[in-house]
Amino acid sequence: MTQNIDREREAQAVALPSARGALDDLRSRVRGPVLVACDPGFDEATRLWNGAVDKAPAIVVQPVGADDVAHAVVFARDHGLAVAVRGGGHNVAGTALADGGMTIDLGAWRDVVVDPAARTVTAQAGCRLGDVDRAAQEHGLATPLGFFSEVGLAGLTLGGGLGYLTRRFGWTVDNLLEVEIVTADGRVLHAGADERPDLFWAMRGAGANLGVVTSFTLRVHPVGPTVLGGLIAWPFERAAEILPAYRELTATAPRELAVWMNLLRAPAAPFVPEAWQGERICAMAVCYSGDLRRAEDALAPLRALGAPVFDLLHEQPYVQVQSYLDATEPKGRHYYWKTEYLAGLDDELLSTWRDLGAQCPIPDAQLGLLHIGGALNDRAGDDGVVGNRDARYVIGVIGGWEPHAPGCEGFPGWVRAAWERIRPFSTGGNYINFQSADESEDRIAASYGANLGRLRAIKREYDPGNVFRSNRNVTP
Ligand SMILES: Cc1cc2nc3c(=O)[nH]c(=O)nc-3n(C[C@H](O)[C@H](O)[C@H](O)COP(=O)(O)OP(=O)(O)OC[C@H]3O[C@@H](n4cnc5c(N)ncnc54)[C@H](O)[C@@H]3O)c2cc1C
């Protein structure tokens, strides 16, 4: 069976850019492996976090430097191949691969340089979030990044980026200072606020559409290295009380406090009392990143709820808080998500959410509400293509299941039906990085809102042939 698939893929790869000659030419220009289906390393390079993704690129290039990336891009453009880039390989839509296309795999590019005096970090494009957090925290510094340490810095940043520090410092791209990028014509360019400001504006939320970024320079801020964080949970039966309490808490919480509320079934983890494993709970993932002397005051409304199923909130390293959810969404499961931005949490939304939490048939699903309101709302709507400056929460149905879980054929349908019920409460926007593969062009347009027209004009200038189309694509 595997052999048949290998043979099919080899045939496809070799047939592609009419052949061996072209591939040999590419191999002679690029330092680093150029892989086709039967080569060692190809399968590993094309296995993504979302096990539901089933795509077969024709070629994987693992370049050594920016000039190699440029040769690969020009080759792909000249042979009509879509270029996808693999950073951390965590995009739920599987856009690091294009069927029959070229994947430029930067996964091994993981160097990070911190300049504590200038308060900047420069990271290569294959860095995982944990690489950057760990290096910056050696100096007590951090920039807003997501809270799963194996996610790629590149994909996250190029789509906007959010995490526990977003309330204080905005989207990740509000902290982006400069990128080095290879564009569709094979140029290696720099873009920042003072250099190619139009390109830089579009990089801040739609970057995967514009080229291959080889490095990112970001502003970092004093954070930690110790914060108050962890998990706390209550029985789902108390949802009618816990959900409004979450609304009250987030309405007045200082920006140093970020809380993610989840309705889910308790995992079979050692910290969950045995009787609660597999039972429905209301859980909160918490990070207080300010002055620790004020942390307990900020958390008082949570503590006041009393009688948790478990309470793991304590002082701990920021890097630990940034990775303690890693195990909850393991590589290889099948995932399907639907999310929206919200400006607030009204009663009707909360009771809809509670109903969905009670009905959800997917054992490993999470119904998440993430409070992000704060610094991102301080800027104008056209400050970067990322937009969505009216968003104060992300709401999402995060479906995940083992490949052959009983009833799994119906799970994507349930996620979609649940999403239909929360859509009426949306700002109209949604986070491009959380889009599943089947989202329509309208949903992509909704992500960029009023910024779409300017984005399209910049796309026309830098990628008129749409070489970079393996992403949430904005056509030129
Ligand atoms: C478990 C999990 C948790 C997450 N948590 C968060 C979170 O807390 N906050 C948040 O904001 N997001 C979060 N995300 C979403 C995440 O930001 C996106 O999935 C993102 O696309 C992942 O980036 P990646 O580099 O791992 O992805 P990849 O799949 O490698 O790439 C994603 C896309 O970016 C393009 N790309 C990758 N590298 C480059 C590059 N160097 N130049 C140009 N284009 C490139 C690819 O072509 C592809 O289209 C999470 C995702 C997962 C799976």
Image (cartoon, rainbow, N blue to C red):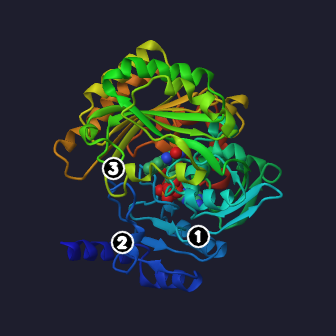
Quadrant position of residue 183: bottom right
- The three-letter amino acid code for the residue at tag 1 is Trp
The residue singled out by tag 2 in the image is 43
In the picture, which quadrant includes the N terminus? bottom left
- The three-letter amino acid code for the residue at tag 2 is Asp
Tell me if residue 372 comes above or below residue 173 in the rendering: above
**Alpha carbon distance from label 1 to label 3:** 35 Å
Q: Secondary structure at mark 2?
A: helix
The residue singled out by tag 1 in the image is 109
**Labels 2 and 3 touching (C-beta < 8 A):** no
Tell me if residue 330 comes above or below residue 342 in the rendering: below
Quadrant position of residue 450: top right
Out of 165 and 69, give the one closest to the viewer: 165
Of the image marks 1 and 3, the number of the one nearer the N terminus: 1
**Alpha carbon distance from label 2 to label 3:** 34 Å
- The three-letter amino acid code for the residue at tag 3 is Pro
Residue count near mark 3 (Cα–Cα under 10 Å), binned few <14, some 14–19, many ≥20: few
The residue singled out by tag 3 in the image is 270
Q: Nearer the viewer, mark 2 or mark 3?
A: 3
Q: Secondary structure at mark 3?
A: loop
In the rendering, at what x and y percent does residue 315 appear?
57, 45
In the rendering, at what x and y percent does residue 460 appear?
64, 49
Residue count near mark 2 (Cα–Cα under 10 Å), binned few <14, some 14–19, many ≥20: some
**Alpha carbon distance from label 1 to label 2:** 19 Å
